Amino acid sequence: MNRPDGRKPGEMRRVKITPDYIIHPEGSVLIEMGNTKVICNATVEDKVPPFLMGKGLGWVTAEYSMLPRATNTRSPRDISKLKLNGRSAEIQRLIGRSLRAVVDREALGERQIVVDCDVIQADGGTRCASITGGYVALWLACKRLLDEGKIERMPLTDQVAAVSVGVYQDEPVLDLCYEEDSHAIVDSNVIMTGAGAFVEVQGTGEGRPFTDAELRKLLSLGKKGVMQLCRAQRKIMEARG
């Protein structure tokens, strides 16, 4: 089995996380996973959704979008249709769920952090890159709140990261690029905490049903990839103290 970019089945693409990519947000990173590039910005707002008012709990949510020429053909902006397309809506809900899984909302207090994930170049795995980069942007925003004395303790209980796995040419592989993803027999995403607990697993047999043995191999590859991504996250966090 030959992967399009020559990687081994269990090999990740090059991962690079650049902090403070945009100067205005409380937390900002550019994450690059191979040729996929996503800008993740975290904005702190001194308000919460109406259903949380007066409860002493914070909220973390996300928005996701893709630039028209992030892909090899132009996609119209959602605003031209006056509504968010179904794919973007599903992905941003996933990002929000994944980030909230490691948030102590009481420690955050009655404020909301919105994590905007904007894909500027897509080559597979954009939702996974958004979760992984979105976490670092969220951490930077929380660190700023802590440093400014606006919260008493860090409200993040663990790291969270995500990676794609799948069956390509009948072999389980890690971190699919677009060419692999578009021809994958099985397409999956694995979201995990830094401690190795699963947050969410998405898996679909695109070309055929997949076996228990294949699922176990995919989960093992997913864990390997997530742990590598968590190490990349920690480099940024450790540099910021």
Image (tube, rainbow, N blue to C red):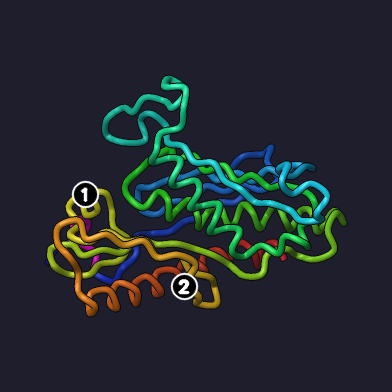
- Which residues make up the magenta segment? 4-8
User: Viewed as shown, does residue 42 lie left or right of 3?
Assistant: right
Q: Is residue 189 above or below residue 220?
A: above
Residue type at the position of mark 1: Ser
SS of the residue under disc 2? helix
Number of residues whose C-alpha sits closer than 10 Å to that of mark 1, classed few (under 14), some (14–19) or many (20 or more): few
Residue 107 position within the rendered picture, expressed as x and y whole percent measured from the top left = 78, 62
Q: Nearer the viewer, residue 146 or 166?
A: 166
Q: Residue at x 82, y 57 (%)?
A: 147
Quarter of the image where the C terminus is located = bottom right
SS of the residue under disc 1? helix
Q: Residue at x 46, y 32 (%)?
A: 84
Residue type at the position of mark 2: Met
The residue that disc 1 covers is 182
The residue that disc 2 covers is 227
Q: Residue at x 30, y 72 (%)?
A: 218
Residue 65 position within the rendered picture, expressed as x and y whole percent measured from the top left = 46, 37
